[in-house]
Image (cartoon, grey):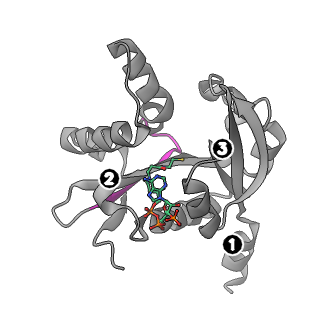
Amino acid sequence: MSDGARIVAVAPADLTPALVEQIDAIFFEASGRSFTSAFERAAFRERWLGRYLQGGTDVVLLALDAGGAAAGYLIGALEDPAEQERFADITYFRAGFRDLCRHYPAHLHINLAPAFRNRGLGARLIAAFAARAAEAGAPGLHVVTARSARNVRFYSRCGLAEQGHTLWKGGEVAFLAMDLRGEQKNKTTGS
Ligand SMILES: CC(C)(COP(=O)(O)OP(=O)(O)OC[C@H]1O[C@@H](n2cnc3c(N)ncnc32)[C@H](O)[C@@H]1OP(=O)(O)O)[C@@H](O)C(=O)NCCC(=O)NCCS
């Protein structure tokens, strides 16, 4: 099925207030959470979204609908999160998954607006991020999600396989990963 959206990479300076508002709406809807204070809400946004919108080597991919509005996004970081202070608050990187992070250092978060799910758009965003991460020299990429989440099936179809799991905040989270070394070899040999 055609998803009717185009994928663009966006630099932080090109994120208009309207786009940020749309990304925020997708993020909070997908979180399914409520918050007891504005502070808690802002901290949650900063941890899972805001810190990836500051530039540097982080990647922001947007899926834009026909009118140019955000239908979904993928945000990601290319270097090992277990080695970066800015991710110290997400303790599974340094605890259960430290070795895995070295092998699959790039990581991502992805969310689509409900109307754009189940049309293959998420897989296109993952493929676009994998290409960028391979291009940047990352040997692998990963995502961490609840082990029982429905999206595990989606990631599996995208080529991310479980390499480990651990307990985090009272639930089991899985480390799903994709090796990118083959893609890099194909690039250098032109195959
Ligand atoms: C997960 C997601 C990015 C997949 O993108 P997509 O374009 O819908 O995926 P595809 O069309 O390629 O594949 C459909 C699969 O997506 C997943 N999916 C679809 N809707 C979903 C939802 N509301 N929640 C969780 N996963 C969902 C399922 O695995 C589905 O396959 P299934 O029907 O066999 O279970 C997208 O559905 C989404 O944003 N879901 C809600 C938020 C989420 O789970 N984000 C990931 C957090 S780790």
Separation of marks 2 and 3 at Cα, in angstroms: 28 Å
Element class at badge 2: loop
Q: What residue lies at 70% left-to-right and 56% top-to-bottom?
A: 177
Number of dots carrying numbers: 3
Decide if residue 83 is in sight here.
no
Q: What residue lies at 60% left-to-right and 58% top-to-bottom?
A: 133
Q: Are marks 2 and 3 in contact (CB under 8 Å)?
A: no
Residue to which mark 3 is pinned? 79
Magenta stretch: includes residue 122: no
Is the CB–ligand 1 distance for label 2 below 8 Å? yes
Magenta stretch: includes residue 55: yes
Q: Quadrant of residue 89?
A: top right
Disc number placed over residue 29 in the picture, else none: none
Q: What residue lies at 43% left-to-right and 71% top-to-bottom?
A: 120
Residue to which mark 2 is pinned? 113
Between marks 1 and 2 in the image, the one whose residue lies nearer the viewer:
2
The percent position of residue 119, horizontal first and vertical second, equals 39, 70
The image quadrant where one finds the C terminus is bottom right
Is the CB–ligand 1 distance for label 3 below 8 Å? no
Residue type, numbered disc 1: Glu
Disc number placed over residue 183 in the picture, else none: 1
The percent position of residue 73, horizontal first and vertical second, equals 39, 52
Q: Which comes before the other along the chain, label 1 or label 2?
A: 2
Q: Which comes before the other along the chain, label 2 or label 3?
A: 3
In the image, residue 107 above or below residue 65: above
Q: What is the span of residues highlighted in magenta in the rendered image?
A: 54-64
Q: Quadrant of residue 53?
A: top left
